[in-house]
Amino acid sequence: MLLHGGGHSALSWAVFTSVICSRINCRVVAMDLRGHGDTKVKNPDDLSAETMAKDIGKVVEALYGENPPPIMIIGHSMGGAIAVHTAASNHVPSLLGLCVIDVVEGTAMDALNSMQNFLRSRPKTFKSVENAIEWSVKSGQIRNIESARVSMVGQVKKCEEPLSSPGVSKSISEGIIEEEEEDEEGGESNHKRKKEDDQEIKKECLYTWRIELSKTEKYWEGWFKGLSSLFLTCSVPKLLLLAGVDRLDKDLTIGQMQGKFQMQVLPQCGHAVHEDAPEKVADALATFMVRHKFTEFKEGFPCLHPAPCHPSLLSTGDYNTTKSMMTPLLPTHS
């Protein structure tokens, strides 16, 4: 089960899913967390760790009833934190393993102070989805163009109101007004040009972010505070994938030295590790799952670990989820 990061959607995992399904026998379920993607819930603004962890358990129950198969939860960033909370609260009784991608308590808590500045630095709108894809790659948010082409579709949406409406125009208008003030010395011609540009923009169908992450700030600390301790106390086999070893905090450094979890660093990746390097992440997870006898490599695929391939505990046969992933799988309705 795959849990995406804040602002992303199930489509964040599309390229990775295609790769992992070519490596091992497995079934993949990726869900849009509440407030994200196409998921609709009664209270989409409640993004507390407790509520979202319960959501995971409810989705598993809806899919499999009282007898779910062995499940490994894999989460990135915010989704990694929710994966840990889900495991620690035993919302998935058949949990087999846990993988957290590029999120640890220490660096996450340190980053919270600058998070609002980062969110303000992003464009408020895009002229098209293609424009959003281009921005994501050029800014380094997603370094893999193949991933960006799929992932950004789940991150942006058409503006629901005309640009001139207060709900959408405020942030954009502020930028236009600021530009006019700066060009005031340029005279009436500049002012006229700005007005013409404004009219052109109004005619365009703009895209904006599906979720306003800045409004979720009150939940940030709850996602990450105490995360390292929770992660270490989860009794299932654990894998931590990081973009850099500098992200380790004290508790995890000690835990890693004690052999409480397996860790792998994937250099030359940004924060969206599974999108930047889907094959490397798939190889790491395939090796981990085979080593712990969760599944087996597909016939003809070379084992990446010297241990022999083992019978599958998770396999339900070949299950090509690539098509499903192109439309986020199983939006949650409650």
Image (cartoon, helix red, strand yellow):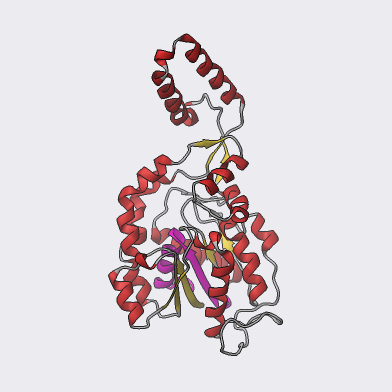
In the picture, measured across the screen, residue 216 lies left or right of residue 323, that is left
- On-image quarter of the N terminus: bottom right
Q: Does the magenta stretch include residue 38?
A: no
Whether residue 255 is visible to the viewer of this picture, yes or no, is yes
Give the residue at the far top of this rendering. Answer: 188
Residue under the point 36% across and 53% down: 219
Where residue 90 appears, x then y in whole percent? 43, 73
Towards the viewer: 268 or 251: 268
Residue 24 vertical placement versus 226 (above, below): below
Whether residue 93 is visible to the viewer of this picture, yes or no, is no
Residue under the point 53% across and 53% down: 142
Where residue 278 appears, x then y in whole percent? 57, 64
Give the residue at the far bottom of this rendering. Answer: 308
In the picture, measured across the screen, residue 241 lies left or right of residue 38, that is left
Residue under the point 60% across and 53% down: 145
> How many marks on residues?
0
In the picture, measured across the screen, residue 222 lies left or right of residue 98, that is left
Residue 325 vertical placement versus 163 (above, below): below
Q: Give the range drawn in magenta.
A: 67-92
Which of the 4 quarters of the picture holds residue 2? Answer: bottom right
Which of the 4 quarters of the picture holds residue 255? Answer: bottom left
Where residue 253 appears, x then y in whole percent? 32, 74
Where residue 280 appears, x then y in whole percent? 55, 69
Residue under the point 48% across and 68% down: 266
Residue 316 vertical placement versus 115 (above, below): below
Towards the viewer: 193 or 218: 193
Which of the 4 quarters of the picture holds residue 323? Answer: bottom right
Q: Does the magenta stretch include residue 77?
A: yes
